[in-house]
Image (cartoon, rainbow, N blue to C red):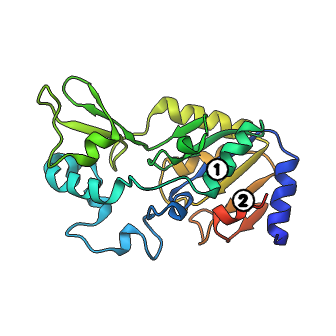
Amino acid sequence: MTDSTAKLKELVDGSDNIVFFGGAGVSTESGIPDFRSIDGLYHQQYDYPPETILSHTFYERKPEEFFRFYRAKLLAPDAKPNAAHRKLAQLEQEGKLKAVITQNIDGLHQAAGSREVLELHGSVHRNYCESCGKSYDFDFMLHGQGIPRCTCGGRIKPDVVLYEEPLDNRTMERALQFIANADMLIIGGTSLNVYPAAGLIHYYSGRKLVLINKSAVAADLNADLVITDPIGQTLSQI
């Protein structure tokens, strides 16, 4: 165990109101690519940049292209929870971790056993008809072709927040509350480039701010502890 990991363990052991705020880097060890790393989606070649494809405007104007990208790059049926997901679920079961606030849409925190998961950007596991509201699951979207259609004929939209779309106010308010009340905030696997989600961390006023990320982040956090090792490897040791 490194000195920084030992310090992290000491902080966790002395806390009972921990909140975890995570991003795409939490799921890369499960085989899901992030956006901004060297192997991420922004460094791959498509006819349009991923940020453009994942915008509300593109979804409306070129839905067939949107869903082709969505199925190929955002749905990962073989992905399983990794050591980071499992440790966070364990900390919740022990009564130490009060909430996971995630920018991810893959549902791996819940698959690992976490119960209090606030999904800021929605989930690929929820889909609904834009006309009648009927719900559809992950498998329906994965195995479909072209633009997914409801039995009523309406288009089925993933419950995923696209660029240009607002975040859910209730989810944001609950996330803010958890962060404001926490005695320890762990930020992991995120570059803090995406707002308004990244702005939530500024509501933390405690003295145990930990950052676990392989690369530099956008915000100057003045964290009490910074760890640049892989997050699954790090959390599995505490």
Q: Please, is residue 175 above or below residue 72 in the view?
A: above
Please identify the quadrant where the N terminus is shown: bottom right
**Looking at the rendering, in which quadrant would you find the C terminus?**
bottom right
- Would residue 212 be seen by someone viewing this image from the given angle? yes
Q: Residue at x 67, y 40 (%)?
A: 179
Q: Residues within 10 Å of mark 2 (few under 14, many from 20)?
A: some
The residue shown at (21%, 53%) is 66
Measured as percent of width and height from the top left, residue 213 is found at 62, 66
Q: Kindly report the distance in space between the C-alpha atoms of the residues bearing marks 1 and 2.
A: 8 Å
Task: Determine the residue positioned at 48% across, 72% down.
Answer: 37
Q: What residue did someone put label 2 on? A: 236
Q: Are marks 1 and 2 in contact (CB under 8 Å)?
A: yes
- Which numbered dot is residue 86? 1
Q: Is residue 57 left or right of residue 236?
A: left
Instruction: Please identify the quarter of the rendering in which residue 157 is found.
Output: top left
Q: Residue at x 18, y 41 (%)?
A: 148
Q: Residue furthest left?
A: 153
In this rendering, position of residue 103 left or right of residue 155:
right
Q: Is residue 34 left or right of residue 52?
A: right
Q: Position of residue 168 (x, y in %)?
A: 44, 34
Compared with residue 156, is residue 131 higher up or lower down, i.e. above or below?
above
Mark linked to residue 24:
none
Q: Which badge, 1 or 2, is on the more N-terminal residue?
A: 1
Residue nearer the viewer, 33 or 219: 33
Please give the count of numbered marks on the rendered protein: 2
Which element is circle 1 on?
helix
The amino acid on which the numbered mark 1 sits, given as a three-letter code, is: Arg
**Secondary structure found at label 2:** loop
Characterize the local packing of mark 1: few (<14), some (14-19) or many (20 or more) Cα atoms within 10 angstroms. many
Q: Amino acid at mark 2?
A: Ser
